[in-house]
Image (cartoon, grey):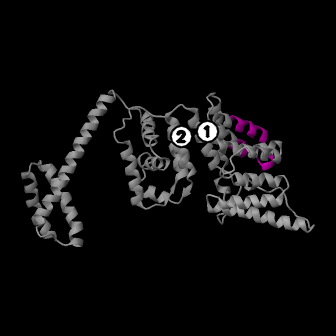
Amino acid sequence: MEDLLRRAGPRALAAVVRRGAGFADAEDAVQEALLEAGTRWPADGEPDDPVAWLVTVAWRRFLDARRAHEARQRREERHERLVPPGPTEQDDDTLLLLSRCCHASLSAASAVALTLRAVAGLTTAQVARAYLVPEATMAQRISRAKRTLAGATFDRPGDVGAVLKVLYVMFSEGHSGEIDLALEAIRLTRQLAAATDDPEVDGLLALMLLTEARRGARWTDGGALVALADQDRSRWDTTLIAEGVALVQGALARDRLGEYQVQAAIAALHDDAAAPAETDWPQVLEWYDELLRLTPSPVVALNRAVAVGEVDGPRAGLAVLDGLDPALPRLDAVAAYLTERAGDLADAARRYARAAATATSVPERDHLLRQAARLNAAARRDSTGAPTGVRDEGRHT
């Protein structure tokens, strides 16, 4: 086949030049056609007229290249009209690109995928592996995101809040082998923090670091979830905690309070406690009150109920839950934790089992089922008059 291609190539080049293509462009196009022939002909068989086949493919490549060149020229001309000449600040470019990838018109999943592809520089295959989906599926998702943004102009950075929301979603996606989304989110947030003077960016970075610091203690060697109160705190990363605490203190000192700064402050209080009993729950509750003022969401109210239970007693926490939607995710888990602390083991076990039925992950479901089994066993022992040995180890997840 090499001889055939060697003979047909020049004839195809001449035909493409004769049709009006410049020599250099025609040569590039024919080279691409020859490469395609080398791939397809062994599998599909040689065409009846190899030269005509090469000319057709080469001419198509030439037209594609010319259209791409013309489109690029139009973009450059539009850019010249929009952006005054002068040096480009790299920091501004970072925020501009993140704004584009995190545009509000995109779904969170599409925005994360596009950010990983365009800003983090990952290949489509790597992004697909991070999400455990086929590469073709991820390629379609990214293409759809690009089409959604087609025609939009981005001459200035967009809403930083939208960017932070996408980065936090990326961080919360967890970890999946080759590509660690949490670390990617931290890396990009560091980049953004260097490009902006927004305390909320520092707040989000602090929140990520303070959460990431506990990663090593969050799971057993067998992959079981370990609740915060049961974690071996000697395994927490003190370097990350120190950096996170410094960041959130610096952000709060700028007196432009935001939700990520508040969440980071709560995380810092947990990380600062050498043991669960040393957690400064009154201060945690104060920060939850502030967070509820800033973002009055049911999820924040649910988490605040735990703090109320620690400060004012479990029945006070349960009273807070009475005012929330019973269908709220994780409400049963929190209710089970507070009910156990109130001393009703049988009811707490039922609530843990009910929470397990709606858990969003296998580790969380298994953790809740273990809590239910533990309390059921304790309740049986209690009914026989034997020592229960039950300690206050019910743990909200």
Does residue 208 appear to the left or right of 112 in the view shown?
A: right
The rendered magenta stretch, by its main secondary structure, is classed as helix
Q: Position of residue 153 (x, y in %)?
A: 36, 35
Query: Quadrant of the image for the C terminus?
Result: bottom right
Q: Within the image, what quadrant is residue 97 found in?
A: top left
Closer to the camera in the image, 255 or 298: 298
Does residue 143 appear to the left or right of 392 in the view shown?
A: left
The structure residue drawn at horizontal position 61% and vertical position 41%, both measured from the top left corner, is 206
Reply yes or no: does residue 63 show up in magenta.
Answer: no
Q: Position of residue 7 (x, y in %)?
A: 9, 66
Q: Position of residue 54 (x, y in %)?
A: 14, 61
Q: Is residue 361 above or below residue 199?
A: below
Closer to the camera in the image, 343 or 244: 343
Query: Quadrant of the image for the N terminus?
Result: bottom left
Q: Is residue 360 above or below residue 308?
A: below
Q: Name the N-terminal-most of marks 2 and 1.
A: 2
Q: Within the image, what quadrant is residue 235 found in?
A: bottom right
Q: Position of residue 147 (x, y in %)?
A: 36, 46
Label 2, label 1: how far apart the Cα atoms are: 9 Å
The structure residue drawn at horizontal position 67% and vertical position 56%, both measured from the top left corner, is 218
Would you say the residues marked 2 and 1 are in contact, meaning their CB atoms lie under 8 Å apart?
yes
Q: Amino acid at mark 1?
A: Tyr
Q: Is residue 284 visible?
A: yes
**Residue on which disc 2 sits:** 164
Q: Is residue 337 above or below residue 288?
A: below
**Residue on which disc 1 sits:** 260
Does residue 307 appear to the left or right of 74 in the view shown?
A: right
Provide the residue span drawn in magenta: 267-290
